[in-house]
Amino acid sequence: MKYWNGNGYTTTTVNWGASPPALSIPAVTTSNVLSGQLVSVSITNTLSLGAATTSSSGTAPCRTTECQATAQVASPIQGDIIYTVTIAGTTVANVDISVDFGALSVQTNYKAAPLAG
């Protein structure tokens, strides 16, 4: 995953494993003088990663009863990205972008063919 760090993009690796990892993206603020006024833009976030769950049923080789496997992630990324713009110390814009990628789920079923004979 890449995020803006104020000077360029930083790449960070995200490995889910058994539980979702903590996601730490630092706040960024940049300022410049425009028309004699100090203009600042700050970007903060409350992003988090969703938990993954898996389940399976049946016994290999899955001839008498069907085997099933499922996996689900609540939302790969969810939370808020907040942009705040100030001019001469006065907030002129405060934009909150809510992010929720929705649930991801997959399921597979398998039943082996009966033995010949």
Image: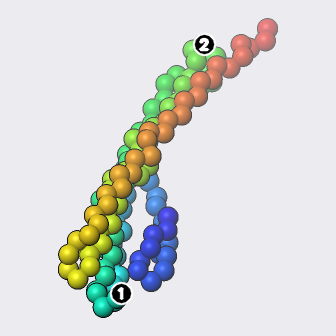
Q: Residue furthest right?
A: 117
Q: Residue at x 20, y 80 (%)?
A: 89
- Of labels 1 and 2, earlier in sequence is 1
Q: Position of residue 50 (x, y in %)?
A: 38, 48
Amino acid tagged 1:
Leu
Q: Residue furthest left?
A: 89
Foreground residue among 99 and 60: 99
Q: Is residue 44 visible?
A: no
The quarter of the displayed image where residue 42 is located = bottom left
| Mark number displayed over residue 64 | 2
| Mark number displayed over residue 88 | none
Q: Position of residue 90 (x, y in %)?
A: 20, 75
Residue at which label 1 appears = 34
Would you say 12 lies left or right of 36 here? right
Name the secondary structure under disc 1: strand
Q: Residue at x 46, y 61 (%)?
A: 14
Q: Is residue 80 visible?
A: yes
Name the secondary structure under disc 2: loop
**Labelled pair 1, 2 in contact (Cβ < 8 Å):** no
Q: What crowding class fits label 1: few (fewer than 14 Cα within 10 Å), some (14-19), or many (20 or more)? A: few
